[in-house]
Amino acid sequence: MFAWNGRAIKLVIRQQARLKMKINSFLNQNPWRRIFFITISLTASSASAEYSVYQGEYGFLSGRMQVQMAALGEINERSGDPGADKLSNIYWEHTFEPEIRGGLNLGEGSQLYSDFSMIYSAMLGHDPSGITFRGHPHSSRDDYAPYPDFKEWMMAEQMHIGWKSGKLFEALGQDAIDFSAGSQDYKLGTGLLLANGTDDGGFRGSYWIGSRTVFVNTLIARINFKSLKFEGFYLENNPRNPENRKRYTGMNMEYNYKDVVNVGFSYINDDHYGGSLTAVTDAYDFRLDFKPLPHELPGLSISTEYVYQLNNKLTDVDPNNPTLYWYGDMGEKSISGGFGQIEYRFSETPWQPTLSYRYAYMQRGFDFMNFGFKTWGTWFQGEINGEFIFDNTDLITNTTRLVLSPTESVTVNLIYLNYQLDDPAVWSVSSSDYGNEVDLVADWAVSDAVDIAAGIETFIPNKGGKQVFGGGNEMWIQTMVYASFKF
């Protein structure tokens, strides 16, 4: 039998120290290696989505963490735009979000609850948005400025407290009343106007993943009574640039009839108060989702949303050349936008294909507020142009989407988008015919804790797109790999 004497132990310690030095040297030579090593270390043992510290008659306390990472590659970035040489052909994003949730049980099943999380984000490279680009690093946190290749940032995400009624108002139902305040998520309808309250990208990194979504300094009241839902809210966004600060005050009403018809109406007052540019928008949002033939054609559904806005200009740094929301000649005080969609799911067909068509129109000057992600192609309209080029204003899109489910855990999306500019003068071009994009994206739910996605996307500019990209006329090709781990 081998005996561990003092000399042998010292030899092992020295060997371990040498190995540690070699590993550190290897990782420090390249940020890509460091990020990859951290990811593998933290996610290799992920087995469940949440850890329960306490669950009992007094309440609950639990913790969880989500790790997200994405790698994207670009060919003919921005369709050959001469300025694209300052961007990256390959770039990496990475986020960590530890979270603690707790609840304190009160009388009649009511409960005080709270949630706190932090997000660390990192990015190696410069994405096609152009918010950061190669050059002598800029000292301030400006958009569209040179930055180092590696950017990282940490800030609080969820940070709110709330109360739900339990059975306290039994006639109204379980948890019929809910009040909450602080930094939290809020999504209105499909997310066309309100969904993503915090900017990523720039000095915050992780532009494409977009893990930060909360609105800050919120007050939200909810009342649910059978098929009716009422909400009142006050929200503030959290942009990279303080000049873009907004606060939203409004209400939302929804009625659901046997999951056949869902009707919604919202009023939103958008106060853009961040800097020298200030404006107020009053928005009236009408939504309708229904199944016209629930028994004969249960797979058929129709949805629409119409937004009517009154834009009231208060101040501008140059009234003769207004820039906020691209108002143009300022003769347009009322702006509209919205979409109509028809969808059919062939539930009895192998792979259960779902085919849909959507027409979306956001007029020049449409206040896109803080829209967010619902699914691929909504409301980031296209994995190339919706992610990196367009906000939802001065834009007309025709979208056809095919979704296939080869297995319960795998979903494949094939999306075609045609883009038209409502007013090409906004982009200082003469043609409204911007171009066409095709996205192929596959999702694999490996387990409750692991999700993987991969995609390839292409964009072919037409006359208007070539003008936007300074004469670039090449096919833009993008590849994407994404993974999420929850534990």
Image: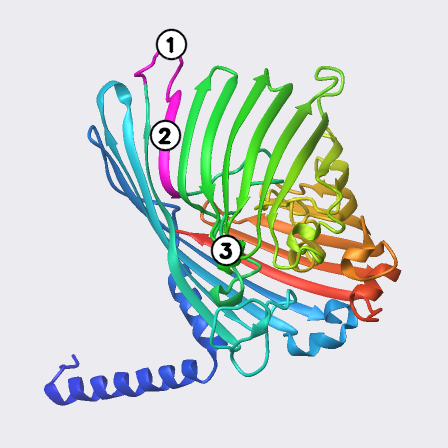
| Above-or-below relation of 90 to 343 | below
Q: Nearer the viewer, residue 45 or 282?
A: 282
Q: Which of the two discs, 3 and 2, labels the residue nearer the N terminus? A: 2
Where is residue 465 shown, x and y percent of the image?
82, 61
Q: Residues within 10 Å of mark 3 (few under 14, many from 20)?
A: some
**Position of residue 198 in the picture relative to residue 313 (left or right):** left
- Secondary structure under tag 1 reads loop
Percent of width and height locating residue 27: 42, 80
Instruction: Check the image and report above or below for 406 versus 144.
Output: above
Q: Which residues are magenta?
A: 167-183
The reply to whether the magenta stretch includes residue 169 is yes
Quadrant of the frame with the N terminus: bottom left
User: In this orientation, does residue 241 appear?
Assistant: yes
- Determine which of the numbered discs, if any, sits on residue 195 in the image: none
For residue 396, side relative to residue 260 (left or right) = right
Q: Amino acid at mark 1?
A: Ala
User: Residue, x 57% and y 54% (percent of image)?
Assistant: 277
| CA–CA distance in space, label 2 to label 1 | 18 Å
Above or below 341: residue 141: below
- The vertical placement of 86 against 344, above or below, is below
151 or 355, which lies in front? Answer: 151
Q: Residue 179 got which mark?
A: 2
Q: What type is the residue that disc 2 sits on?
A: Phe
Query: For residue 88, which quarter of the picture?
Result: bottom right
Q: What crowding class fits label 1: few (fewer than 14 Cα within 10 Å), some (14-19), or many (20 or more)?
A: few
What residue did someone put label 1 on? 171
Q: In which image quadrant can residue 208 be found?
A: bottom right
**First along the sequence among labels 2 and 1:** 1
Q: Nearer the viewer, mark 3 or mark 2?
A: 3
